[in-house]
Amino acid sequence: MTTATLTAKNNASFLQLISAPFRAFGRFMIHTAETSPYARKLNDLNLTSDEELAARGTNRVAEIRRIVGPISSM
């Protein structure tokens, strides 16, 4: 007669299993924030040099106020 012993190796600890939904929710929230139109505009502004802004006749502070203005009035 042959017997087989099966052992399931669970690499995830109890705390990792409990925290998984919260980590997934956190990743979702970060992804949502990073893909918002405001974040994209601020990222584009960050990639723009001060010289380019001066050529457009504006500065960084004015552009931030223009981009973030609708958010701050909520």
Image (cartoon, helix red, strand yellow):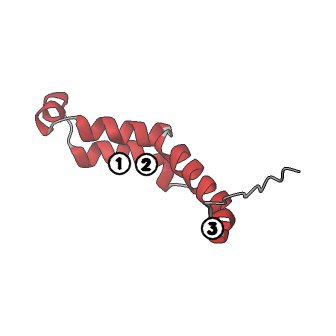
- Where does residue 74 sit, x and y in percent of width and height? 56, 55
Vertical side of 1 occupied by 55: above or below: above
Q: Residues within 10 Å of mark 1 (few under 14, many from 20)?
A: few
Callout in the foreground (3, 2): 3
Vertical side of 21 occupied by 70: above or below: above
Q: Which mark is residue 69?
A: 2
Judged from the image, the secondary structure of the residue bearing numbered disc 1 is helix
Q: Are marks 2 and 1 in contact (CB under 8 Å)?
A: yes
Vertical side of 40 occupied by 27: above or below: below
Q: Which mark is residue 13?
A: 3
x 63%, y 67%: residue:
13
Q: Residue furthest left?
A: 51
Q: Which sits in the foreground, 3 or 17?
A: 3
**Which quadrant would residue 14 be assigned to in this image?**
bottom right
Query: Is 53 situated left or right of 19 in this image?
Result: left
**Which quadrant would residue 48 be assigned to in this image?**
top left
Earlier residue among tags 3 and 1: 3
Q: Amino acid at mark 2?
A: Gly
Count of number-bearing discs: 3
x 61%, y 53%: residue:
24
